[in-house]
Image (cartoon, rainbow, N blue to C red):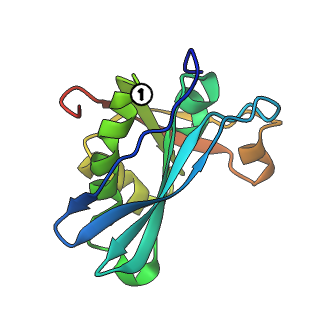
Amino acid sequence: MIKGKFKFLKPGPLADGELQVVLVKTTPADPVKKYVPGYEFEMREKGRRAGAIRLRIGRTRPLSGWCGHIGYEVDENYRGKHFAARACRLIFPIAYAHGLRTIWITCDPRNMASRRTCEIAGGKYADTRPVPKGTEMYREGKRRVRRYRFDLKGFN
């Protein structure tokens, strides 16, 4: 967890060419569920929703081990434009501003598009791990994740 009282930041406009990343929701920590605070953004092209990306802020074993700090999905009509990788790079400074210097993104080992996204965004493959039994991800049927490490130096 992040120490002290958590304060959400106002990221302002985030854009990379035709891709805009727009904050749509913040979620406070939930100590009962052991959830950390998070941001949810929409990826947009020309004002239209192209996907979503979420950033979780914290230093916990689940985040570094199997959940990851960032989750994303790109709507089918917008795939192939590297929107997820570009959106990751746009929100890295927010993680950095919250004191995170390293973040993790995980994906299903069979998801070649997500693996490529992590590589394009600058992640370094760390390992492939089992998802612990009893976790929400395990109950959803996920059994293994590939972990990518991102060092955020230069994203401040």
On the rendered structure, is 31 left or right of 142?
Answer: right
Q: Which residue is mark 1?
A: 98
Category of crowding for the residue at label 1, using alpha-carbon neighbours closer than 10 angstroms: few (below 14), some (14–19), many (at least 20): some
Residue at the top extreme of this rendering: 3
Can residue 11 be seen in this snapshot?
yes
Nearer-the-camera pick, 89 or 66: 89
The quadrant in which residue 135 appears is: top right
Does residue 4 lie above or below 94 as drawn? above
The quadrant in which residue 97 appears is: top left
Residue drawn at (46%, 76%) of the image? 75
Residue drawn at (39%, 34%) of the image? 95
Does residue 9 lie above or below 87 as drawn? above
The x and y percentages for residue 20 are: 30, 66
The x and y percentages for residue 127 are: 46, 31
Residue drawn at (67%, 35%) of the image? 29
Residue drawn at (36%, 38%) of the image? 94
Nearer-the-camera pick, 75 or 10: 10
Nearer-the-camera pick, 73 or 66: 73
On the rendered structure, is 19 left or right of 130?
Answer: left
Disc tally is 1
Q: Secondary structure at mark 1?
A: loop
The x and y percentages for residue 44 are: 36, 73
Q: Which quadrant is home to the C terminus?
A: top left
The x and y percentages for residue 58 are: 54, 27
Q: Which quadrant is home to the N terminus?
A: top right
The quadrant in which residue 99 appears is: top left
Nearer-the-camera pick, 58 or 128: 58
Q: Amino acid at mark 1?
A: His
Can residue 126 be seen in this snapshot?
no
On the rendered structure, is 133 left or right of 55?
Answer: right
